[in-house]
Amino acid sequence: MLREAPVDVEARDSLAGGLAGDAEAPGADRGLTGLAIEVRGLSFAYAGGPPMLCGMDLAIERGTINVVIGPSGCGKTTLLRCLTGIIPAIIKGELGGTVRLNGREVVAAGREVKPNEISLACGLVMQEPDHQIVMTTVEDDIAFGLENRMKPPGEIRAAVDSHARSVGLYEKKLENPHALSGGEKQRLAIAGTMASLPSILLFDEPMSGLDTEGRAAFAGLVRDMRAEGRTMLIVEHDFEELSFADTWILMKDGRIASATPPSAAPRELLEGGLWL
Amino acid sequence: MSAGVGAGGSAGKRGLRALDPRPKLLLMATVSTLCMLTEGMVFLFAEVAALLVLLAVGRADFALLWRRCRTLVALIASLFVIQALFAAPGSYGTGLGGGAGGGAGAAETAGAAAMADPALINIGNISLVHISGLFLAAMLALRLIIIVVSAQILLEGEVRDYMLAFTQMRLPYELAFMVVMGLHFLPILRDEAMSTYYCMQLRGVAFRKTSLPKKLKAYAGLCLPVLVSTLRRADETSTAMELRGFRAMGGRTYMRKLVMNRADVAALVLLPAVFVTLFILLR
């Protein structure tokens, strides 16, 4: 018989609460100064591979939208894996430096917080929505994260209906997610992560499967979440559609090359020279 | 079945589909156990008939049922033939033979069994099909049919309801998830296998209209990518579940709750009772 894994209650509560993770009180975050994400000297190399992150430093303010831009292989996805604890808990390699989420250290050499505990504060929308959908109906999939957070059923139902509506899937809430189109799956993955109420949201190329209408809707959702006080880090090639972001972060060779408001973005980025 | 907090529950569903999953699970357990406990052919036939009646009364879609089962029917038929061909004389307690003997009198016992249970087909000195073998094969086939048909009763329901049923029956939720994930992923894996199959065909690999060795080689080539993608998929799903907080709080709540109504309670009691009564009368 399976036994319940021992839960470090103190650490968990500090993550869920101390990270100001619960967007139950997202407004509480609003106006707060301080860093949501703080990365210092982060370096990582996959086992037997070259370094993907090379002493990266990054500081993200709470309640801001940040777009990470960079050529393929520059370490964007590796960065997201470090922020969610997939590295080092699931993917092993040579890790250095630290990651702090809402002031708490979650990743460091010799310290490993489980991804499921980090997820209470920090949600990730993966590149492939198929990999993220785990339940057999749209509404159950949106509810999954909230059920794991042990929210009361009435609250879960209200959140599910509201998030299904916000991504245009309310009419399909009883359908099998695997029967949805690519764009609908992407919207479901976004709704499922948003509904889990993390204060920090990470997106890995969220607009890749969306049509024009879906992209506009996504942009609207992101703005709404900023208004709620959530912090967002969006890895996206089509960054020009996110010109309302607070910061465009340019990554090159495992480091941050620049972090500026879109209006002050480097010329090479705007002229497409980055990928040449 | 009705459901707690706004589940949609049994609204719009009829017959077996509207029934709570728990009576179906109990029925499946009862029917499968009873068919293994008996050696009575009459009871097995009665069990199959009763299950078919239940499916008919429960408004099951027999055309869909046939589409789901037709591959299994071929499998059961081949098992029947193999069992009938190779069962030893007197291997079924029909009174035709004394069963396989042992020790010093083994040869005599086997001879006596062969006398009492003569072969129906002989090829030279080799006797192939005996009446007891036919009985044994029929029993095996009936048991498989019972399991397949009772599984169809389970399929008259939604996977997500079974997960709720398991957890409400105090099964650890990790275990319930494992079962449900298995059921959930079967069609996805089938789709992935079909995609790989079509991709290989598009790249010129012939699966039909080719020699047997080439066919075997082509199917072996199909297995590896499907296996790799299955393992990858399982890995990614478990990571995705972790990233969505699975097991982070040492427990979980549920948006929906299954609540049994009178019809569900009646089915929970009466359906297994009918099969147990048949067992007592006909075994």
Image (cartoon, rainbow, N blue to C red):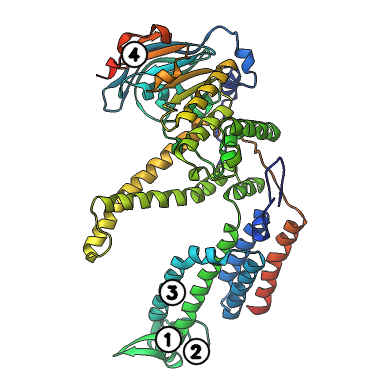
Proximity of marks 3 and 1: CB atoms separated by less than 8 Å: no
Q: Real-space Cα distance between discs 1 and 2? A: 10 Å
Q: Real-space Cα distance between discs 3 and 2? A: 24 Å
The one nearer the camera, A226 or A119, is A226
Label ID, residue B96: 2
Give the x, y percent position of residue A18: 59, 16
**Which chain does the numbered disc 1 sit on?**
B
B83 relative position to A195: left or right: left
Label ID, residue A270: 4
Q: Real-space Cα distance between discs 3 and 1? A: 17 Å
Residue A227 in view in this figure: yes
Label ID, residue B77: 3
If you read the primary sequence from the N terminus, does the residue marked by circle 3 or circle 2 appear first?
3
User: Taking A249 as reference, is B133 above or below it?
Assistant: below
Q: Identify the residue under disc 1.
A: B130
Task: Give the number of the mark in front: 3 or 2.
Answer: 3
Task: Give the number of the mark in front: 4 or 2.
Answer: 4
